[in-house]
Image (cartoon, rainbow, N blue to C red):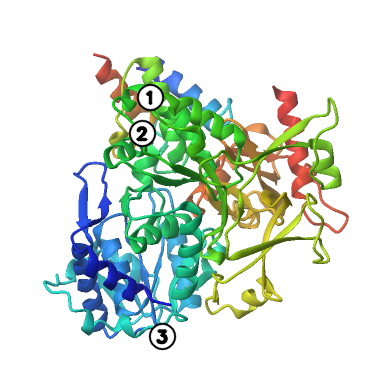
């Protein structure tokens, strides 16, 4: 067994001048870094952490945007033996007050010793600090001195043990922010070994990614996996990609990309929004796996992507699927490379009402379910009913897993860890079934909304809605609604309000949209302010999200 | 200019906000307010190109280039000439 610093050292001893990472920017040239350059940059940060007397085993939070500093600050923390955790940077639309409150909450649970950020953001970060909290130092990137020599012996990260926590991964969403998944060196390497095997990963691989590093898919598949495996990573910012999705294709062409991971919506987004003029000279024939992960996977999305890009060298069998989560470091399953993911056509009625997947009887409506693949060799998956008994093949239940790459725990939240891990099995909260060894994911146990790969809790959106004047507390409902065209969910908020005048209701709807948008990670698609008694409640007075969703869908239909 | 504003306003209200009757004021912030999210920004650019024959580059899809209907219409108008 090994540790991150040991692996970096041995890669460096073998091929110091190999390009490990290419950073891409919207209005600057690509910056390629050899492993030697990467580690020199990282060592500068290690030294800064040492000077600030940040101890190995303590947590450092990185609030940085895409670029060299983020990369150096992360690997510098690793070489110093501190535990890095990347937090999303403040975006244009998010309210600074909300951001500050989230940061303060994160600090109170995670208890970091230091925060790294830019000089111009330092005041913002300091405003979230409180007298007596854990933060001893705000390290400003501009003041980090460049290191000219790389001396592994002086780096304290080499004293870390394989079982020690190496990093924290915070899930997105306001409630989730306080839940940091703690992973050990050993867990990450166990994942990389098993997942790498299923991908036949090798040093000739080139990973191309635009995924954010504060998300598990971006952090593990789009950052740590290529760097620790000795592959080449070409990395761009998610903000650049969303405005110019064609850059992913251009990057694959330029660097002969072989592997990429995308959430389902990105297949639709790329298929619909890229203009042919941006694809001149594009050659996607090097892509051996484009892996659909982190949102429910849709066969239709693969079709659209394949149709759009097949004339640019994309092979249909390159389109793959995976089921992954931070609690297992990353991958739980992977479809078998070289062929297409298995598609199982199931009877819709039986699927919805009997909670079982079986082939449709003649003429019955069906749904095409795409498999997320088979469990990795180090992962066991089973499906449980509500009493936590294992169910038969093709019966739908909660997905549970066990592996040698599970989380150490939710950091400083033993209560949550205890709830999530029962008898050594991690209860995922996802619904699904197994058929012929293939795992199919069909939904979430809780009403969580997954939009564009981000997880959002409807409770958080409902709380925010209640803060808007004119809306009654407890009289709003939020849910996700699958949008076929976009390949992801649209977020809907419905709130009961006092005024019955449509113009007044419209004003409140606008206020809800503005408030929720500024205070959450998502943008709302449908916002409705409605008369009282619109929202359906259960007999116990709880808001029934699915019943309200049905009602809203029916209203939309009649308006068509 | 007024035609451009009204075409844009109808499109954004109906297709992005899903509220065809919503009046968008000419000076109402669209991007910095989050009314148009980053995924929908591309739709605005594609719509402008298809309807007005004017290109908006990806690096221009931000509140610094345009944040209101008036600013977007002015940008379109200046490029049509």
Residue A70, horizontal then vertical, whole percent: 30, 62
Q: How many marks?
A: 3
Is residue B24 visible in the rendered structure shown here? no
Residue A89 lies left or right of residue A298; in this view the side is left
Residue A188 lies left or right of residue A540; in this view the side is left
Label 3 marks a residue whose chain is: A
Name the residue carrying label 2. A246
Please name which of the two marks, 2 or 3, marks the residue nearer to the observer.
Answer: 2
Q: Disc 2 to disc 1, how far (Cα)?
A: 8 Å
For the point 22% across and 70% down, which residue is it?
A: A13
Label 2 and label 3 in one chain: yes
Label 1 and label 3 in one chain: yes
Residue A258, horizontal then vertical, whole percent: 38, 44
Is residue A457 visible in the rendered structure shown here? yes
Please name which of the two marks, 1 or 3, marks the residue nearer to the observer.
Answer: 1
For the point 76% across and 43% down, which residue is it?
A: A548
Name the residue carrying label 1. A275
Q: Classify A342 as above or below A11.
A: above
For the point 36% across and 61% down, which residue is it?
A: A229
- Give the camera-side residue of A525 and A485: A485
Reading the chain from its start, which is encountered first: label 2 or label 3? 3
Reading the chain from its start, which is encountered first: label 2 or label 1? 2
Q: 10 Å neighbourhood of mark 1: few (<14), some, or many (≥20)?
A: few
Name the residue carrying label 3. A132
Q: 10 Å neighbourhood of mark 2: few (<14), some, or many (≥20)?
A: many
Q: Residue A75, located in which quarter of the rendered image?
A: bottom left
- Give the camera-side residue of A437 and A403: A437
């Amino acid at each position: 067994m090994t540790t991150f610093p040991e692996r970096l050292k041995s890669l460096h001893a073998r091929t110091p001048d190999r390009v490990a990472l290419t950073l891409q920017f919207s209005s600057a040239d690509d910056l390629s870094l050899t492993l030697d350059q990467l580690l020199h940059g990282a060592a500068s940060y290690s030294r800064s952490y040492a000077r600030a007397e940040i101890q190995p085993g303590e947590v450092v939070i990185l609030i940085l945007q895409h670029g060299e500093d983020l990369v150096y600050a992360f690997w510098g923390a690793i070489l110093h033996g501190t535990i890095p955790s990347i937090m999303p940077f403040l975006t244009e639309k998010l309210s600074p007050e909300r951001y500050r409150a989230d940061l303060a909450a994160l600090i109170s649970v995670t208890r970091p010793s230091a925060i790294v950020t830019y000089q111009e953001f330092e005041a913002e970060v300091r405003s979230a600090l409180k007298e007596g909290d854990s933060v001893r130092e705000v390290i400003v990137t501009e003041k980090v001195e460049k290191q000219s020599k790389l001396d592994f012996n002086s780096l304290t990260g080499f004293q870390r043990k394989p079982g020690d926590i190496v990093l924290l991964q915070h899930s997105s969403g306001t409630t989730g922010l306080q839940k940091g998944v703690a992973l050990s060196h050993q867990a990450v390497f166990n994942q990389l070994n098993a997942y790498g095997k299923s991908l036949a990963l090798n040093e000739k691989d080139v990973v191309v990614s635009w995924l954010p590093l504060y998300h598990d898919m971006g952090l593990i598949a789009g950052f740590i996996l290529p760097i620790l495996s000795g592959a080449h990573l070409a990395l761009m910012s998610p903000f650049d990609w969303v405005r110019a999705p064609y850059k992913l294709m251009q990057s694959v062409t330029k660097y002969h990309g072989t592997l990429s991971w995308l959430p389902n919506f990105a297949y639709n987004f790329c298929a619909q929004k890229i203009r042919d003029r941006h694809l001149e000279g594009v050659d996607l024939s090097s892509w051996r796996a484009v892996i659909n992960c982190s949102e429910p996977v849709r066969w239709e999305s693969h079709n659209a992507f394949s149709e759009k890009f097949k004339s640019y060298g994309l092979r249909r069998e390159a389109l793959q699927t995976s089921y992954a989560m931070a609690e297992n470091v990353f991958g739980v399953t992977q479809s078998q490379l070289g062929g297409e993911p298995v598609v199982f056509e199931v009877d819709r009625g039986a699927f919805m009402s009997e909670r079982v997947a079986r082939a449709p009887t003649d003429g019955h409506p069906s749904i095409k379910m795409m498999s997320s693949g088979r469990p990795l060799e180090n992962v066991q998956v089973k499906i449980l009913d509500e009493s936590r008994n294992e169910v038969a093949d093709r019966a739908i239940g909660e997905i549970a897993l066990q592996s040698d790459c599970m989380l150490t725990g939710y950091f400083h939240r033993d209560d949550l860890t205890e709830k999530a891990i029962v008898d050594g099995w991690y209860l995922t909260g996802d619904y699904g079934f197994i058929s012929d060894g293939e795992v199919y994911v069909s939904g979430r146990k809780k009403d969580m909304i997954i939009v564009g790969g981000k997880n959002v809790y409807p409770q958080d959106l409902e709380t925010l809605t209640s803060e808007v004047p004119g809306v009654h507390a407890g009289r709003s409902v939020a849910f996700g609604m699958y949008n076929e065209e976009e390949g992801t969910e649209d977020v809907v908020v419905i709130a009961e309000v006092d005024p019955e005048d449509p113009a007044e209701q419209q004003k409140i709807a606008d206020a809800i949209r503005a408030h929720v948008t500024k205070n959450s990670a998502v943008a709302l698609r449908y916002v409705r302010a409605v008369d009282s008694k619109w929202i359906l409640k259960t007999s116990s007075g709880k808001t029934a999200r699915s019943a309200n969703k049905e009602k809203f869908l029916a209203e939309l239909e009649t308006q068509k | 200019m007024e035609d451009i504003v009204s075409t844009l306003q109808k499109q954004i209200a109906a297709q992005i906000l899903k509220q065809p009757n919503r009046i968008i004021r000419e000076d109402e912030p669209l991007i910095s307010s989050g009314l148009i999210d980053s995924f929908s920004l591309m739709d605005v650019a594609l719509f402008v190109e298809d309807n007005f024959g004017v290109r908006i580059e990806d690096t221009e899809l931000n509140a610094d280039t345009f944040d209101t209907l008036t600013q977007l219409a002015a940008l379109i108008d200046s490029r049509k000439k």
